Each structure stands twice: as C-alpha cells, then as structure tokens.
Image (tube, helix red, strand yellow):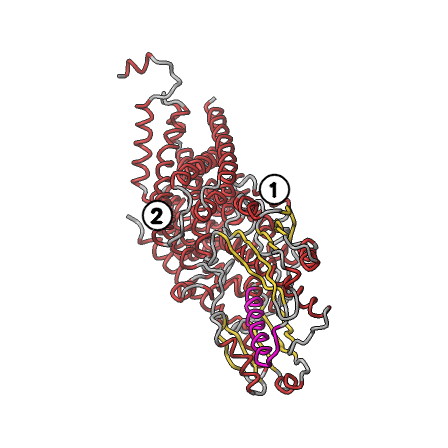
C-alpha cells in the first residue's frame, strides 16, 4: 500500500490519508462533548427560547384608567378597553396616583377622563381625553398607540350609531398580509434563527477547532507529515460540514414539527442552499482560525464578525432597507443576509427562483472567496 | 495580601494585553459594534419600497397617494396597470407593500358610505409588516381627519390627546442605545472572565497557581478585578458615546447608574468565572459563555419586551442580571430615575453576583481531578 502511494505524484488527494484525518477529527468531536453541544444543544436552546420566549405582539398591556367622575358616558368609553384582549385596565380615581404607577412601570399608559367629561360630551363641546403612553420602549409604545386608536374608533362608531346618525364617510383600510396573515412572529423568527445557528456551527466551531491545533502546535506537526494542505483542509471541512448538516436537519424538524412553521418551498432547495451557506460559513471559520491562531482571539473574532452580524445585520429582526446607507452597504458582506432571505422565502413563500438564485449565487461567490483565501494563507505558512 | 493580588492581576492583564491580536480584540470590536448596531438596530422604517395599482380616475386616490410619496418613510418604485403584476413584485421582494385603489375609490368617499383602500403587505418579516401597517394606518387616519374637516363634517364628539412620556417621538434609538451599553458590557466582561480559568486549566498553570501561597479568595479577587476594570472602562466609554454622539438624554443621576454598573459587573463576572471554573477546556468555556450569553441577551428585554413572554419564561428572566441592568439604564437615561427608585433592581444583581462568585471560588478547588 505504502509503495503504491509513493509512486503517485505527491500532491493530489489520497483517500486513505483523508480518511485518517477525518477519523481523527470525528474522534476529537466525540471526545470533547462541547462540539456536539454547539451543533445540537445550542440549536435546541436557541429554538426553544426564540420559539416560546420572544414575541413582539403586545397583549394585556397594563393600562391605568382615571375616571374622575363616573357616569354612564365614562362607562361606555372605558368598556371598550375592558373588552379588548390587548389591554388589562386598572381603575384609578386621581391622576397623580396613575402617574406614579406609570413612573414605577406598573402601567404602560394612562387614559384620563376629567370630571367634566360627560357634561361636555352631552353638551356637544368635544371634551379632551388625556392619553399618556410610556415611550421608553418605542416599538411597544407605538403598538399601544395603534391599539388605542382601534378602541377609540370603535367607540366613535358606536356613539354615532347610538345617536342615530349615519357613520361619517371614511377611508377604511383593508389589509392583506401575504405569507403570514396572522402575523405570527414565530413564523419569521424561527427560519431566521436557523441562519444564526448555522453561522454558529460553521464559523464559531470551525475557527475554534483549527485555532486549537495551531495553539497546541499540532498543526505544524501535521504539516511536516506527507499530508497535503488540501487534504488537511478537506479533513477539517468535511466532518464539520456533516455536523452542520445534522444541526440543520435537527433545526428544520423542530421548526416544522414543534413550532408548526409552514415549509412552503421544497426541502431539497432548502438543503441545497443550506449546504451552500454552510460552505461559506466554514470558509469564514477556517479563515478566522488561520489568522487568529489562538482560541481566545478566534472565538472573539468569530462572535464579532459572524454571530452578531448574523443577528443584527442580516434582516433577521431589523429591516435592512431602513438602515443608513453605509450600514446597508455593510450588510452585503454578511453571508447570513443572503441566507436569511432564502430561508424566509423558502419557508413562508415557496420556491421563488429570482430570490433564491440571486442569494445562492452571492453565497457561492463568498464561499469560494474565503476558501481560496484560506488555501492561500495556509500554503504561505508552510514556506 | 494585596501585593499578591496585584501581582496576579498584573499577570492577568499581561495574559490579555501582551498579545497584539488579543489586545485588539478587547478594544476595537465593542466600538465597531456600538456604532454599527446603534445605527442598524432600529424598528423605525425608512424608505419602504412600495408600488401602487390605481384603478381610480378620481381625485381622492391621488390625494391619498401624495401623502405616501411625500413621506420619507415610503418610496414609490412602481405603478402597475393590472392585478397580475402584484404577485411577482411582492414575491421577488422588489416591494414591501402594494396599495390598491379600486375603480370606485373616489366615488365611494361620500357621506354615508365608506370606501376601501386595499393594502397588500409582504409578511415574511411579520414584525416589519405590522410596523408598516401601523404607518399606513396613521396616514389613513390623518387623511380621514383632513377630509372630514375640508368637507365641513368635523363633528367628533371628543378629542384624543396622545402624549408619549420619556420618549415623545417614539424613537427606537433612545431605547436601543442604552440597551447596547448593557449588552456590550455583558459580552466583554463575561468573555474576558469565562476563558481566564479555563485557559490556565488547559495549559496546566492553574494547578501551579493553586499550590502557590495565594489563597482561593485572593485568586478570586485577582481574577475578578481585571474583568471588572475592563468592563467599567468600556461601559463608561459607551455611555459617553451614547450621550455625545447619539444625543441620548441622560436625565437621571450618574451615581444611580454607576451603582447599577458596579453590581451588574459583579454579577456578570461572577457568572463568567463560574463557567470558567467548571470548564476543562477553552472550547467548553466558550460554549458555556455562549449558552449563558445568548439567552441572557434575548430574555433581557433588550429587543423584545419581557411582558410579552409566557409566564414561565418571565419567571426565568428574574435570574438574568442584564434584565435588571437594562431597567436601570433606561430608567436613568430616559426616565430620570434616582437611587431610591432603583432599589428593586439593585439587590437581585447583588445576590446573583454573590452566589456565582462564591460557587466559582468553591469550584476552583473542587474541580481538581
């Protein structure tokens, strides 16, 4: 066997050597459970937290209702809040107590009906209704503001009906939300999360593993063996690629069966594009580790340049179009951006080829770029 | 005792700052993240690309459309002539929404009748979609009010005066940037400490440290202080940037903020050291840090409100030091809170810090195999 190998040209891949390297890598993965942890435990924890814990849909907002003088008219007004599932109203008799509650964060808003509310209303004098909303959480504040207006326009309508007038003519908004009519935030968070998980497995895990070899000096040891650089890289690449695809299948099954996220596109498109993304992420991971060469630095860099951007700059939660131009430009070099776009489309909309092909091409280009870079850097180190 | 601690601290700082790359990693990324995330992490929408499909020859639809094209939040990218064009445009993400005026839009806008404005929204990101619907609704409400006024039909029986406290224009950035102070401080201090013991264990120098005359308490202090100093310096810097660069109002008292920061760093470093003292390798330390950091950030109220979480998860957030520190940050920055008002946020962090530090110290000795 040895003789046959010696007869062949030295570069060129040898299946036996590659097998040996991969076997070593798999043993290492199995021996330190934290690799398997990153591939399976982390997705599990992340998916559970995001699937159950995160919601932007405010329900039962605590609301202080100050009625200075209770009358049938004030009761008619406040009933709308009591029957709304969005609000959990609490009655207060004076405004200072309610303001105190708002300041302490016990309520998120105040509705203030002054003592002359009914009197003015009956006299047709258009009384003022004071509304204070806690604006610290701007997003929630705005949602509460929207709910308030909903209750308010219901009240107006009821009032004009009870007064026997026809409703004022108005433009009514008829909204149709495509792909996610119920606006379930879970349906977009879970697919987006898969991009974050794949980034973690691909980039963080790989960068740590290779950096460990540099740190311990075993990489140099590997390099003086007859093993070719391409074989070393492939030996690193394939095991973690398989681990990553395992993590992907696990995450997709959880998304579909546990969280009932619809998968409207085809599974093979999902698998192909995920493989492409994993290729890019592994390329980044390998690249980081060849530069960093120690685990602390590699881990930090991986978090800063792969994990956090996958969270914030990928369009996973925050809308890319609304970012300043410079930041938008920056998102183009975040691979997760393309993958999130594919994932949200394949899960919620279906196989829409213009979106998939464009983003897949971008991933392919970035992945190849990183791999060429890694190959180049690693060879240079050998000289 | 202090001389020995200072010597240990010196060694810790050297371990972190001696290497050029490691020095770079502690200083530069938090700053870049501060800038990028402060600009990127916003729930406000700008320049939403939209298309219009207007079948109505009347005036009202054009007036309505002018309100959209005139708003900086919207950007008209296409006018359609038949319904079949809508789906490809939305599917390919060319537009986020399509406004559809039916042929009778203007005609139906008459007393006693109601007319319909159809809105088609890409719901792939449901959060963006619901914010978008809110924007559109506000435009429609304003249109209705003005239209009623122009046609002498202002007979609203009451007026709603909505005022937002603390953040009058609902600016996302005022909410996010104080949050980033907490987020980055947590990430830096946990990462610096989470690997500190694990690194020595992996290199075998921790056993050597244990047989020196240093007592466990001294080792603990020597390991805590560097992370503490780095965290405090970075937090201060970020606070300065938040105030001077992003013009976030700092309305409350600085002592209240720094008492919070002190206790927060104590608890964050406690968690980091505990992870580090349990881990055998650096990779395990990093995994542990991650398993703590990610849930800690997500379940802190940084991006999504705790009040929207299920009851059980809300209980779980009580163990999260970042939850308390975010309340302190936003309280001091926006609401102008003082020391006494923040007492309910201080003591839980102190307890978390105490428990984690004591157990870290215990694990120092009992993790020897």
Q: Position of residue A312 (x, y in %)?
A: 53, 49
Same-subunit check for callouts 2 and 1: yes
Residue sitting at the far top? A7
* Residue depicted at 58% across the width and 74% down the height: A157
Rendering quarter of residue B138: bottom right
Residue A157 in the magenta stretch? The answer is yes
Q: Position of residue B193 (x, y in %)?
A: 45, 51
In this rendering, position of residue B171 left or right of residue A201: right
Q: Which residues are magenta?
A: A143-167
Circle 1 marks a residue in which chain?
A: A
Is residue A248 something that shows in the picture? yes
Q: Nearer the viewer, residue A332 or A286?
A: A332
Query: Which label number is shown at residue A329?
Result: 1
Q: Position of residue B128 (x, y in %)?
A: 54, 54
In this rendering, position of residue A337 left or right of residue B253: left
From this view, report whether residue A41 is shown above or below residue B165.
above
Residue A299 in the magenta stretch? The answer is no
Residue indicated by mark 2: A253
Q: Residues within 10 Å of mark 1 (few under 14, many from 20)?
A: few
Most frequent secondary structure within the magenta stretch? helix
Give the mark, 2 or 1, whose residue is nearer the N terminus: 2
Query: Which label number is shown at residue A85?
Result: none
Q: Nearer the viewer, residue A165 or B318?
A: A165
Q: Position of residue B222 (x, y in %)?
A: 45, 53
| Closer to viewer: mark 2 or mark 1 | 2
In this rendering, position of residue A339 left or right of residue A95: left
Secondary structure found at label 2: helix
Looking at the rendered structure, the number of numbered marks drawn on it comes to 2
Q: Quadrant of the N terminus of chain A?
A: top left
Is residue B188 something that shows in the picture? no
From this view, report whether residue A2 is shown above or below residue B86.
above
């Amino acid at each position: 066997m040895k003789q046959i190998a010696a007869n062949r040209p030295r570069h060129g891949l040898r299946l036996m050597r590659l097998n040996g390297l991969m076997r070593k890598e798999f043993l290492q993965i199995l021996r330190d459970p934290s690799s398997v942890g990153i591939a399976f435990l982390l997705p599990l924890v992340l998916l559970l937290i995001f699937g159950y814990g995160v919601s932007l849909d405010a329900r039962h907002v605590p609301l202080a209702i100050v009625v200075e003088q209770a009358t049938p008219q004030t009761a008619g007004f406040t009933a709308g809040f009591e029957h709304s599932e969005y609000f959990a109203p609490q009655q207060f008799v004076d405004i200072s107590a309610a303001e105190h509650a708002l300041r302490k964060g016990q309520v998120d808003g105040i509705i203030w009906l002054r003592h002359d509310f009914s009197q003015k209303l009956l006299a047709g004098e258009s009384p003022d209704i004071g509304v204070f909303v806690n604006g610290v959480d701007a997003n929630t504040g705005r949602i509460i503001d929207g709910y308030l207006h909903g209750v308010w326009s219901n009240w107006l309508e009821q009032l004009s009906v009870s007064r026997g007038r026809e409703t004022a003519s108005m433009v009514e908004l008829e909204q149709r939300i495509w792909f996610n009519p119920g606006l379930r935030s879970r349906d977009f968070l879970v697919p987006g999360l898969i991009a974050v998980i794949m980034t973690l497995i691909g980039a963080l895990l790989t960068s740590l593993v290779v950096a460990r070899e540099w740190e311990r000096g075993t990489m140099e040891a590997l390099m003086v063996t007859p093993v070719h650089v391409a074989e070393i890289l492939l030996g690193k690449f394939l095991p973690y690629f398989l681990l990553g695809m395992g993590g992907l299948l696990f995450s997709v099954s959880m998304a579909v069966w546990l969280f009932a996220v619809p998968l409207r596109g085809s599974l093979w498109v999902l698998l192909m594009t995920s493989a492409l993304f994993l290729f890019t992420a592994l390329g980044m991971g390998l690249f980081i580790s060849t530069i960093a060469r120690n685990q602390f630095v590699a881990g930090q860099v991986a978090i800063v340049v792969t994990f956090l951007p996958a969270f914030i700059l990928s369009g996973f939660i925050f809308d890319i179009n609304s970012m300043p131009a410079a930041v938008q430009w920056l998102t183009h070099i975040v691979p997760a951006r393309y993958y999130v776009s594919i994932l949200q489309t394949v899960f919620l909309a279906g196989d829409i080829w213009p979106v998939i092909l464009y983003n897949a091409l971008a991933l392919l280009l970035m992945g190849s770029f990183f791999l060429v870079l890694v190959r180049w850097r690693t060879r240079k180190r050998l000289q | 005792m202090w001389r020995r601690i200072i010597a240990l601290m010196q060694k810790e700082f050297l371990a972190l700052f001696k290497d050029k790359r490691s020095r770079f990693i502690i200083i530069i990324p938090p700053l870049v993240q501060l800038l990028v995330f402060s600009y990127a992490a916003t729930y406000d929408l700008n320049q939403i690309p939209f298309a219009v499909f207007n079948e109505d020859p009347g005036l009202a639809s054009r007036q309505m459309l002018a309100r959209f094209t005139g708003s900086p939040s919207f950007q008209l990218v296409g006018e359609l002539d038949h319904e079949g064009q809508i789906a490809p445009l939305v599917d390919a993400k060319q537009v986020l929404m399509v406004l559809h005026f039916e042929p009778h839009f203007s005609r139906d806008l008459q007393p006693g009748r109601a007319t319909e404005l159809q809105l088609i929204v890409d719901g792939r990101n449901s959060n963006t979609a619901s914010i978008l619907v809110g924007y559109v609704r506000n435009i429609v409400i304003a249109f209705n009010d003005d239209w009623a006024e122009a046609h002498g039909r202002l007979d609203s029986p009451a007026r709603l005066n909505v005022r937002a406290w603390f953040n009058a224009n609902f600016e996302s950035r005022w909410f996010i940037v104080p949050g980033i102070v907490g987020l980055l401080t947590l990430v830096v201090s946990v990462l610096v400490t989470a690997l500190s013991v694990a690194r020595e264990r992996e290199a075998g120098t921790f056993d050597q440290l244990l047989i020196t005359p240093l007592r466990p308490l001294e080792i603990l202090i020597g390991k805590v202080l560097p992370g503490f100093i780095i965290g405090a310096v970075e937090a201060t810097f970020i606070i300065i940037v938040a105030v001077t660069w992003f013009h976030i109002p700092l309305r409350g008292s600085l002592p209240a903020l720094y008492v919070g920061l002190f206790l927060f760093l104590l608890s964050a470093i406690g968690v980091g050291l505990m992870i580090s003292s349990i881990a055998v390798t650096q990779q395990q330390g990093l995994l542990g840090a991650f398993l703590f950091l990610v849930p800690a950030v997500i379940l802190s109220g940084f991006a999504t409100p705790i009040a929207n979480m299920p009851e059980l998860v809300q209980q779980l957030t009580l163990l999260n030091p970042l939850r308390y520190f975010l309340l302190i940050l936003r309280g001091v920055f926006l609401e102008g809170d003082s020391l006494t008002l923040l007492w309910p946020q201080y003591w839980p962090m102190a307890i978390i810090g105490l428990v984690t530090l004591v157990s870290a110290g215990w694990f120092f000795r009992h993790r020897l195999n």
